[in-house]
Image (cartoon, grey):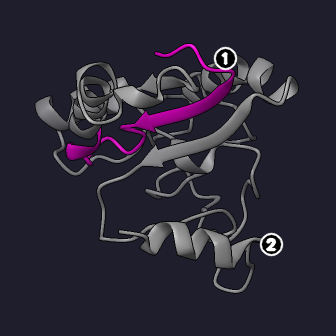
C-alpha cells in the first residue's frame, strides 16, 4: 500500500495464539488506507502481512487455543516449528530449542518452513535494492517494544539510544 520509494514491512500473526496481532494488522491496514496514517502513502510503501502463520492460527480456533507454532509435520511425533525462530537471525541461538516438541523449536535450519521461506523470498528484492527501511513484526504478548539484538540479554543494537527514543516517544 502506498507509492513511496521507502518500504516498511509490517507482519502479524507469527505466533498462532496471539489473536490480537492479526486484528491489529487489519486495523493498521484500515488506518493506512482511510485513517491517521494515510498521509505517509506518498513517501512510503507498506507491505502488510496480516497472518504469517495461518495453519497455526486456525488450529487455535479449532484445537489447542494456546498453540504457538505452525502445523508442520515430519519432526518425529511432534508437530510444528516456532516460525519466529526459523529465520537466519541468530538461528538456533539463545531462546530457541533443538527439541521438536518444545514451543520454541527453531526447525532443522533457517528458512526450513514454507512460511518463513516465502516471507524471505518476497522481501529479498527490497533488501537487495536498499528500499526496505523498517521491518516491524507485531506480537501481542506483554507490553514491550523489542528491537534488534533482543534475542539475548547482553547484545545491544549499535543505535540503541535512537531506538529507545523512538520507542518512548509519545
Rendered view: 141 above or below 67? below
Residue 50 in sight here: no
Q: Which residue is mark 1?
A: 122
Instruction: Report the residue that reaches farthest toward the right.
Output: 128
Q: Residue 72 versus residue 8: which sits nearer the camera?
A: 8
Q: Which mark is residue 158?
A: 2
132 lies left or right of 139: right
Q: Which residue: 30% across, 71% down?
A: 143
Residue 115: x %, y % from top left? 55, 25
Answer whether residue 153 is magenta in the image.
Answer: no
Q: CA distance from mark 2 to mark 1?
A: 27 Å
Answer whether residue 2 is magenta in the image.
Answer: yes
Residue 126: x %, y % from top left? 75, 23
Instruction: Report the residue that reaches farthest toward the left.
Output: 62
**What is the magenta range?**
1-21
Instruction: Report the residue that reaches farthest toward the bottom.
Output: 154
Q: Are marks 2 and 1 in contact (CB under 8 Å)?
A: no
Looking at the rendering, which quadrant does residue 144 occupy? bottom left
Residue 74 in sight here: yes
Q: Which residue: 71% across, 42% down?
A: 108
Amino acid at each position: 500500500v502506498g507509492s513511496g520509494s521507502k518500504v516498511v514491512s509490517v507482519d502479524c500473526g507469527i505466533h498462532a495464539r496471539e489473536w490480537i496481532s492479526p486484528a491489529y494488522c487489519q486495523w493498521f491496514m484500515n488506518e493506512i488506507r482511510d485513517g491517521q496514517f494515510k498521509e505517509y502513502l506518498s513517501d512510503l510503501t507498506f507491505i502488510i502481512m496480516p497472518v504469517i502463520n495461518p495453519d497455526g492460527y486456525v488450529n487455535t480456533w479449532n484445537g489447542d487455543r494456546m498453540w504457538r507454532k505452525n502445523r508442520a509435520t515430519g519432526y518425529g511425533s511432534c508437530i510444528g516449528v516456532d516460525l519466529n525462530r526459523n529465520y537466519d537471525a541468530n538461528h538456533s541461538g539463545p531462546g530457541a530449542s533443538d527439541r521438536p516438541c518444545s514451543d520454541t523449536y527453531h526447525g532443522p535450519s533457517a528458512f526450513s518452513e514454507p512460511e518463513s521461506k516465502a516471507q524471505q523470498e518476497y522481501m529479498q528484492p527490497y533488501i537487495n535494492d536498499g528500499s526496505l527501511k523498517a521491518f516491524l513484526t507485531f506480537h501481542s504478548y506483554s507490553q514491550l517494544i523489542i528491537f534488534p539484538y533482543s534475542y539475548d540479554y547482553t547484545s545491544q543494537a549499535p543505535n540503541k539510544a535512537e531506538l529507545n527514543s523512538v520507542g518512548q516517544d509519545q
